[in-house]
Amino acid sequence: MLKSREELDADLDTAARAWLDEALTEAAHDAAARDAARTDAARAEAAQAARTDAVRAAPHAPLAEAGPVTTPSAATGSPHTSAPWELRYAAAGRHCGQAHADSVRSLLLIEARAPLPSVTRLYEQGTAAERRAVLLTLDRLDLGDTALPLVEDALRTNDTRLVAAAVGPYAAAHLDPHAWRHAVLKCLFTGVPVGSVARLGERARGDGELARMLRDFAAERTAAGRDVPAGLDTALALTEPAR
């Protein structure tokens, strides 16, 4: 379970708390810089639109002297530019301990209001532990369904840590029914407890197709002389229509 900042402060030693303070400050600064860049870009666009409208309205009238309209060149959020806090993300375990690394990395993502390029970069370039922290935090970021490729990638692996993290609240909110059903089966196939699947009861209720897939999976296992995963009956019972 991810810990809050207050819980981390109670658990970390002085040096680790100081490191976390600096890391979160850098993340917040990056978020503020992106906000400022967006504001500047919007103003530049509005100014350019106003000048264009003025020319169309009076094509022969002299325009007042004005400086050039420029678009901000800040690369924050660029697919190719790493913000300083992203380096802290990788170092979280070393400075705050592996037991707290998920929580520290999650706080960094949240404080930075991490954009999709950063989230994708940290996932694709990260270790399994760093990828897990991304997956655990997706539902706390304002990304809509744009980060689904990361969930889909995790569900293609057989790493139970990634599979369990991938079927959290973000997947429950954004995976389409077909992909979500296969995610449930992936948990059963890899031994991830079905209790890891967020909103399982809500999404499974009355899902006849999921029920069919679960029965087929159980039949295949039985025919092959293999045990049926314990969670399968639990998931199958949840597919019963509401009364």
Image: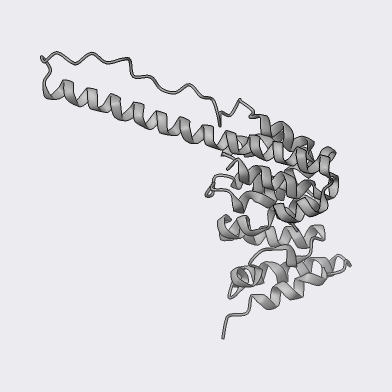
Q: Which quadrant, please, contains the N terminus?
A: bottom right
Q: Position of residue 181 (x, y in %)?
A: 64, 62
Residue 237 x %, y %: 69, 78
- The residue under the point 61% across, 25% down is 81
Asked whether the viewer can see residue 123, the reply is no
Q: Nearer the viewer, residue 13 or 151?
A: 13
Count of all numbered marks drawn on residues in the image: 0
The extreme front residue here reads 14
Task: Residue at 74% x, 75% y: name it.
Answer: 234
Q: Examine the rendered structure and indicate whether residue 162 appears above or below residue 123.
A: below
Residue 23 against residue 159 in the figure, above or below: above
Residue 97 x %, y %: 85, 44
Residue 163 appears in the figure: yes
At 63% across and 29% down in the image, what residue appears? 83
Query: How does the figure colour the protein chain or chains?
Result: one colour
**Vertical arrangement, residue 224 with respect to residue 73, above or below:** below
35 or 176: nearer the viewer: 35
